[in-house]
Image (cartoon, rainbow, N blue to C red):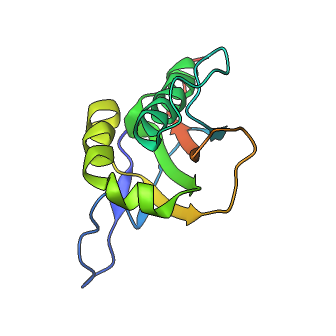
Amino acid sequence: MAHQHILPEGWPVPKGYANGILADRGRLLFIAGQVGWDENEEFSSPDIVPQFERALKNILTIVSAAGGSASDICRMTCYCKDRNAYLTARKELGAIWKSVLGRHYPCMSMIFVSDLLDHPALIEIEATAVIPSGQGA
C-alpha cells in the first residue's frame, strides 16, 4: 500500500519530514517511545548519534514484527534532551536516517525536553504506522 503525502498548494516541499500523510487502509500500529538501548535494555553509548540509530532500528524492528516496512510509518515524535548535541550532529543523523529508513519521511515533530526516564537516554522516539490489511502478525 502506498500512503499519499499531502502537500497543500503553494507550500514548499518539506525537508526531512512530511506535512501530512493520507493512509488508505490498514491496521494502526502505535509504537511506544524507543530509546537507544538494545533488546536487553542496555545502552552501548551515552552519545546521541548511536542512540538515535538504535532508537530508529528499534522502531523498524517493531514495525517489521507487525508485518510492515519503513514506508508504513506515518508519524514520529522525537523527544530530545540535548538540543545542541542534536543540532551539531544533524548531518550525521540524516545519514543514519537514510541508512535505516531510506528516503521515507513521515510526519515528524521534534520536542526538546529537560529529561527522559531511561538514563543515559538523550533521545526517545515514538511512532505510528499503518500496516496494510492482510500483512503481518
- Left/right of residue 113 with respect to residue 55 in the rendered view: right
Q: Residue at x 35, y 42 (%)?
A: 2
Residue 19: percent from left, percent from top: 40, 67
Quadrant housing the C terminus: top right
Q: Nearer the viewer, residue 113 or 85?
A: 85
Q: Residue at x 46, y 39 (%)?
A: 52
Q: Position of residue 116 (x, y in %)?
A: 70, 49
Q: Position of residue 5 (x, y in %)?
A: 34, 59
Q: Position of residue 16 (x, y in %)?
A: 31, 57
From this view, report whether residue 81 is shown above or below residue 48: below
At 33% across and 46% down in the image, what residue appears? 93
Q: Is residue 8 left or right of residue 106?
A: left
Q: Nearer the viewer, residue 104 or 97?
A: 97
Q: Quadrant of the N terminus?
A: top left
Q: Residue at x 33, y 41 (%)?
A: 97
Number of marks in picture: 0
